[in-house]
Image: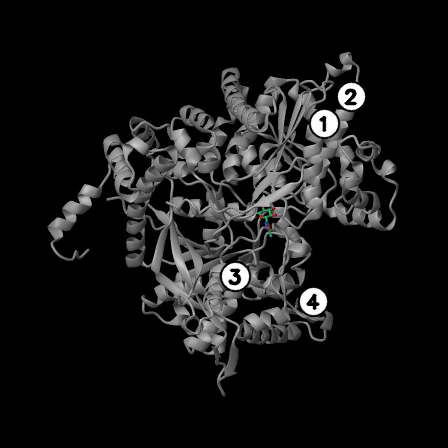
Amino acid sequence: EVLPGDPEVWKTALKAEHVDKEDTQAVANSVVRHVTTTLARQAANLDDIAAYQATALSVKDQLLKRWNETTTYHTKHAPKRVYYFSIEWLMGRSLDNAVLNLDMRNTYETATQKLGFNFEDLLNEERDAALGNGGLGRLAACYIDSMATLNLPGWGYGLRYSYGIFKQLISNTGEQLEAPDPWLDRENPWEIARIDVSYPIRFYGRVESIPNTSRAIWSGGTECLAVAYDVPVPGFATKNTANLRLWASRPIQGFDLNSFNAGNYEASVQSSSDAENITRVLYPNDNMYAGKELRLKQQYLWCSASLQDILRRYQKLDLSWEQLPDYVVIQMNDTHPTISIVELMRILIDEEEVPYDVAWKITTKVFAYTNHTVLPEALEKWPLPLFENLLPRHLQLIYQINLNFLNDVAKRFPGDMDRIRRMSIIEEGTPKFVRMAHLAIVGSFKVNGVAELHSQLLQSTIFRDFVEFKGRDSFTNVTNGITPRRWLLQCNPRLAQLITDTLGSEHWLVHLKQIAQLLPMADNAQFRAAFREIKNENKTRLAEVLASELNIQVDIDSVFTCQIKRLHEYKRQTLNIFGVILRYLQIKKATPEERKKFVKHTAIFAGKAAPGYYIAKLVIRLIVNVSKIVNNDPDVGHLLRVVFIPDYSVSVAEVLVPAADVSVQISTAGTEASGTSNMKLGLNGALLLGTVDGANIEIAEDVGEENAFLFGHLAADVDAVRYANSYNPTPLAERSPELAEVFKAIEANTFGDGHIYEPLLKPIYDNDYYLVSNDFGSYLAAERLVDELWRDQEEWTKKSIRTAFSMGDFTSDRSIQDYADSIWSIEPDPVPEN
Ligand code: OX2
């Protein structure tokens, strides 16, 4: 490398910057340097917040060195790269994860201790980066961790929302209230603002076609800037550091000087605050399409900026556009980034003067699309008038893409008008709609689902026509995974240590399959005792939090059942809480002698409801009000506790996951595409209580069905039951006498005014779309098996050990390797260690 100025001075300076992994003093020096200079604070008035910030900044220095080396190396080497486009990145906290991945946790712990701080306390000062709703956003976070760890050249692209997912408060009456999440208020030590990396983004305006070409000029409308913020993401035990580039919207000019000079101050700043508003807040819907113009603006700003960035990088290689797919692959996390297919066409055709057919060939070799849901209410389709107004040139291109596509369909299936209508990217009607999933499939070379069953369902139901047209090879499955660094090493350090000690090395953290070697330990009484002791310690830690934060006393000898996920009808928190109510009624009815036979239960719930999702909010209300009655009923004693933990987040999950005995995964079969809390909980030894749905199926296969509690109707039977429920409903008491008893208790005001819950109960009486009543009986039977097994703690622990050590396939490293091999065709390209 050529160094400007005096190379010796450079070299000495760079060397002085080096911090040895084990050098506690050097780490302390770097923390103190940030205290005194970056933060301008003194030792005397240093609180935990500032100490956390200085520590984080010091760790970021380490990350940036590796980040620089990685980017320099990749720039020189120019490998094919993958770009993961996700509108959500649910990263959680970074400090603990970073020091673990850097192998500097001990050094930082000791250094901060010597400076007078408790490292755990500092970790708790960090605010979660909660730029996501649930599984989809957390998946992206696990995936970038694995991309970095596997030394794959890849970047993530997303949006830097000023406000992440809302903070959930629970009122006295059990209602969810939403408060903003101003996570950037304290400054974010993990990002670097790249004010020099920004791109103009246009909205609205008009289009003029250039005669005798396929080109057009898009002008007018309004413009703003997308500015890059980079978040370095370290791999585990490698120098390789990935980049997560998040865009923030900014006005192109500070304010409108003409209005300002004319004395119209409000108008002069209006357009500037309009621009800033685009990336102001994350849309708080999970698995639910809302159709708001601002959301489409977010999507376009993010996609256009990311593509401009990628193409600028590519152009430095000085190659032809035809070679783009040899250097660039873009994975679309759901349909949210689908507009980037059209944006790449626009840039190639209108700006780079590439002929239409050539541009289409290039584009369709660059994009791949991951679908995460078959739920109709989650599929994005933009009202055409809204779309045309905001992105007029893109709509023209979509018409052209659709025309060519439907011509090809017509050639393959002559006269099949119904098929053409079904497959069209434009849905007819008033208004018309743009179907983003269809556009995503037409513009991608590969489409995948996120678990075996889900991928099969995609191919046999909503995308069936497309499989018939494009061929089976264009469709595949990549089962989701989770990073074992955060979801075992970080959240359950004692279990991680036990594994490392027993295996004799840490390799399992990057080759998770190796934990299967520990399966025979299930039959070792001493190991079981150690394993159980760790689980109990994790339960104790959770119990302390519940006592101090919620004033609820739980018995750590009870079964901790955990259902921790977004509130959604298809996820059926209802089944769980109705089961709890039935248990409560049974305890009430029992004699003191009979009560002794009950297995003690602690039912733990956590999760947010979309602010506009009335039924989901009502379920929270029911859970909270049931918990108030049950937890304070002297008849219940220690037999039952119900806990709703407010404001679920990644960092809350890190406390819950290691403490769970039972993983509650009870969606209606065929509705949960994969699920990922099932993987986190399983890896930490929770037994699966679940339906035959999503990744539950593959988990049960791997852990062995004898170690899991499966129940409920199968996906293949759901439609028929649903049909019977709505067209020929039998009375609830016939479908499920137990559920009828539960409903009666609710209606009799056992948990406060029963009237309130009518909108929740009525649909179950009337047509029960999600099969709650049809699955209740087998759910209760599965719970009885749970209770029976719990009575034999040695047997339970055996199954728990077998569960944990059979989860080797559910690491995101395996998922990412699958993507790299079967979709991206990219190779590891590790930054050389010096
Ligand atoms: C979620 C799915 O509901 C969940 O099953 C899956 O595990 C997760 O994505 C990651 O693949 N929004 N969130 C999801 O799908 C959509 C749409």
Task: Judge depth for marks 2 and 1 and give the one in front.
Answer: 1
Q: Nearer the viewer, residue 280 or 650?
A: 280
Where is residue 686 drawn, in percent x and y?
58, 30
Mark 4, Cα crowd under 10 Å, few <14 / some 14-19 / many 20+, is: few
Return the disc, 3 or 1, that comes first in the chain's sequence: 3
Q: Position of residue 76 (x, y in %)?
A: 28, 58
* Amino acid of disc 4: Arg
| Mark nearer the N terminus (4 vs 1) | 4
- Residue 299, which numbered label? 3
Going from N to C along the chain, the mark reached first, 2 or 1, is: 2
Residue 806 in view: no
Query: Contact (CB < 8 A) between labels 3 and 1?
Result: no
- Residue depicted at 14% across the width and 45% down the height: 12
- Image quadrant occupied by the N terminus: bottom left
- Distance of label 3 from label 2 (alpha carbons): 53 Å
> Pointer 1: what residue?
629
Label 4 belongs to which residue? 422
Which residue occupies 68% across, 47% down?
A: 670
- The residue singled out by tag 2 in the image is 588
* Residue 698 visible in rendering: yes
Amino acid found under the numbered disc labelled 2: Lys
Question: Which amino acid, by three-letter code, is at mark 3?
Answer: Gln
Which mark is in front, 3 or 4?
Answer: 3
- Secondary structure, mark 2, is helix
**Residue at the extreme top of the image, as rendered:** 593
C-alpha distance separating marks 4 and 1: 51 Å
